[in-house]
Image: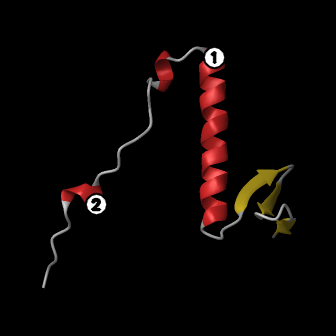
């Protein structure tokens, strides 16, 4: 039996005020920085680490500030 999903649950309203390609370099830098912080906060809120590559190694950063080098 198929269940119909309400349209409100499938759509997510964004926070964009201005299109990225119309931003000045300073606005774009600020926007990208904010995006990174939001992603980090979201990952920590669901108990996941932030994983990134630094100097050829993958690093997992946890909400308590600890880091772990991944293989």
Q: Is residue 45 left or right of residue 66?
A: left
Give the residue at the far bottom of this rendering: 1
Judged left or right of residue 18, residue 41 is right
Q: Nearer the viewer, mark 1 or mark 2?
A: 2
Is 47 rendered above or below residue 35?
A: below
Q: What's the image's color scheme?
A: secondary structure
Report which quarter residue 15 is drawn in: top left
Res 19 quadrant in image: top left
Residue tagged by mark 1? 25
- Residue at coordinates 87% horizontally, 49% vertically from top-left? 55
In the rendered image, the quadrant that contains the C terminus is: bottom right
Q: Which mark is residue 33?
A: none
* 15 relative to 24, above or below: below
Residue at x-position 44% and y-position 27%: 17
Image position of 29 with respect to 45: above or below = above
> Residue 4 at what x, y percent from top left?
15, 71
> Element under label 2?
helix
Contact check, label 1 and label 2, Cβ < 8 Å: no
Percent across and percent down for residue 68 are 85, 67
Q: Residues within 10 Å of mark 1 (few under 14, many from 20)?
A: few
Quadrant into which the N terminus falls: bottom left
Give the labeled residue for mark 2: 9
Q: Tell me the SS state at disc 1.
A: helix
Residue drawn at x 65%, y 27% is 30
Give residue 24's position: percent from left, percent from top. Answer: 58, 14
Residue at the spot x=14%, y=79% of the render?
A: 2
| Mark closest to the chain's N terminus, 1 or 2 | 2
């Amino acid at each position: 039996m198929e269940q119909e999903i309400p349209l409100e649950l499938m759509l997510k309203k964004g926070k964009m005020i201005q299109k990225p390609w119309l931003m000045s370099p300073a606005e774009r830098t600020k926007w990208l920085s904010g995006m990174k912080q939001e992603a980090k906060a979201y990952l920590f809120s669901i108990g996941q680490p932030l994983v990134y590559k630094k100097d050829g190694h993958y690093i997992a950063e946890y909400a308590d500030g600890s880091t772990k080098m991944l293989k």
